[in-house]
Image (cartoon, rainbow, N blue to C red):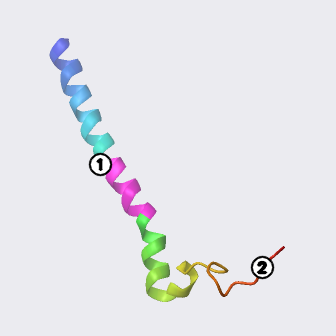
Amino acid sequence: MTQAIHVTLRILAKRIEQLTAQIHEQDQRPTRLVEHHTPQLLEPVGIGRTAPSLS
């Protein structure tokens, strides 16, 4: 029984690692698409000395 639990936990740990890697990849995907197609969307807007004051 102990060996079965150990094997099951090892399988679960590997699956968690795989899913974590997939989540990281999917999180990066939109940024890469924007960088490729419309990089200007990632530039800060209204920051710096040339930005008009709102007050």
User: Magenta span covers which residues?
Assistant: 18-27
Q: Measured along the vertical axis of the image, is residue 12 above or below residue 39?
A: above
Decide whether residue 5 is among the magenta residues: no
Choose between 19 and 46: the one closer to the eye: 46
User: Within the image, what quadrant is residue 2 found in?
Assistant: top left
Q: Which residue type carries mark 1?
A: Gln
Principal SS element in the magenta part? helix
Q: State which quarter of the image contains the C terminus.
A: bottom right
Q: Is residue 40 left or right of residue 35?
A: right
Q: Measured along the vertical axis of the image, is residue 3 above or below residue 42?
A: above
Q: Secondary structure at mark 2?
A: loop
In the rendering, at what x and y percent does residue 53 appear? 77, 79
Determine the residue located farthest toward the left in the rendered image.
3
Choose between 12 and 27: the one closer to the eye: 27
Q: Earlier in the sequence, mark 2 or mark 1?
A: 1
Circle 1 residue: 18
Q: Residue at x 48, y 71 (%)?
A: 30
Residue 36 is tagged as none
In the rendering, at what x and y percent does residue 45 appear? 64, 80
Choose between 46 and 42: the one closer to the eye: 46
Q: Which residue type carries mark 2?
A: Ser
Foreground mark, 2 or 1?
A: 2
Q: Measured along the vertical axis of the image, is residue 38 above or below residue 5?
A: below
Decide whether residue 20 is among the magenta residues: yes
Q: Is residue 24 left or right of residue 53?
A: left
Q: Residues within 10 Å of mark 2 (few under 14, many from 20)?
A: few
Q: Residue at x 38, y 57 (%)?
A: 24
In the rendering, at what x and y percent does residue 51 appear? 69, 84
Residue 53 is tagged as 2
